[in-house]
Image (cartoon, helix red, strand yellow):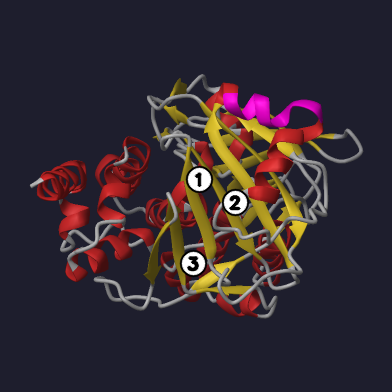
Amino acid sequence: MMENQYDVVVIGAGPAGAVASTRLIQDGFSVLVLEKMEFPRFVIGESLLPKCMDYLEKLELLAAVEDKRFQVKTGVTFYHDEEVCEFSFSERYTEGWDYTYQVKRADFDHALILEAQKKGVNVSFNSEVTDVKTSAEEQVVSYLDSTGTEHKIHARFVVDASGYGRVLPRMFNLEKPAVSIPRGSIFTHVKDSKRTEKASDNIFVHAFRENTAWVWSIPFSDGTASVGVVGEVDFINECAEDDGVKFKELIREFPGLDGRFKDLEVMFEPKKILNYSISVEKMYGEGFVLCGNSTEFLDPVFSSGVTLAIASGYHAADLVCNQLKGQEVDWEREYVDFMKHGIEVFRSYVDGWYSGDLHTIFFTENGNPEFKKQICSVLAGYVWDKTNPFVKRHATVLPTLAKVISMATKT
């Protein structure tokens, strides 16, 4: 093989890129990953879902993650108006994992791509893709390395796993706005020395401002935690003013956190992201496929981002393997329909969160335990299990159930 020739170029070394490249190398294809940044690097989105574990185990990446001794996550705790609703992953409808991890993404992402390198993936950090030309015959990827030297790589296929960088969507004019209300987030990492048994080691999520905003706390195994607020853009801008004064006040005093962060010690000054929800016109084209946040990002409320990134990276690479072996691949049915189903299930739950339907269901006094198990499976990331009524009828089941509960409480 020539130095500038690979079977597949993967753009981005985050979870989607690490998973995709590992799947490709499993079948013996040569892979070059081009990553714009140097790893480890900070990125938000630290709470995994059990579904991720399926893919990490398949690709023999799980041991590398376990070696990092991340915080074990066994469920999620929701708060609202001093009410509490806890989901335990061990009490779910779909067969799968009872736990996953809460991770510092700098460490998690670095562990995955290092393991991919050990398996034979070539990775070039500090490498910025400047041009991609695709055709039926071959794909040509141009990039600048850390010295500013330009390179041209010839490949049989390109996988865009560039995340928020969205290299091919921008380059090929594939971006389209999301249909959701524009929202943003402000966040930091903090010392978590007052963590109590009541606070739990799982993620804490608390809605406020009539369900238009919510706060999170994600404990890490090193005695720190990720804390942040999500809300509509004007409110997040207000929270971020004057070096995040209002945000810091919220974290110190928020109900349910019980003064856990009263003596707030931040690891870095609060960061802000606005208008993060975005979509694309198409997920694939001649010689390329998009995965991870290059396709669509919904909302952080159910920690779906990494799960969708890993799932899309795996399935995209699996189909690339088939195509490069000469098999017929129906990208629309086998990839787009599959990914859109998972995205749309999560979208229904995001919509239900902000509409208040989920709060009505979560905090009802006489909740159906079987319904709770089925919802728990969705919260665990098993959004492709169509035997689950809360997956199969995701678009209608939440508003219908919330309406029934509301009517029952009025009588």
Magenta span: predominant SS is helix
Q: Secondary structure at mark 2?
A: loop
Disc marking residue 27: 3
Return the x and y of residue 315 as percentages of the image width and height: 40, 55
Label 1 to label 2: alpha-carbon separation: 7 Å
Return the x and y of residue 373 as percentages of the image width and height: 25, 69
Q: Amino acid at mark 1?
A: Pro
Can I make out residue 408 in this image?
yes
Q: Secondary structure at mark 1?
A: helix
Q: Amino acid at mark 2?
A: Gly
Return the x and y of residue 346 as percentages of the image width and height: 34, 47
Q: Quadrant of residue 178?
A: top left
Label 2 to label 3: alpha-carbon separation: 30 Å
The question of residue 236 being in magenta is answered with yes
Disc marking residue 185: none
Vertical side of 326 occupied by 388: above or below? below
- State the residue in front, 213 or 117: 213
* Disc on the earlier residue, 3 or 1: 3
Look at 70% across and 34% down and name the residue there: 246
- State the residue in front, 220 or 306: 220
- State the residue in front, 215 or 142: 215
Look at 15% across and 63% down and name the residue there: 387
Return the x and y of residue 339 as percentages of the image width and height: 34, 46
Which residue is most to the right? 147
* Disc on the earlier residue, 2 or 3: 3
Q: Residues within 10 Å of mark 1 (few under 14, many from 20)?
A: many
Q: Which residue is mark 1?
A: 300
Q: Amino acid at mark 3?
A: Asp
Look at 75% across and 72% down and name the residue there: 222
Q: Which residue is mark 2?
A: 45
Q: Are marks 1 and 2 in contact (CB under 8 Å)?
A: yes
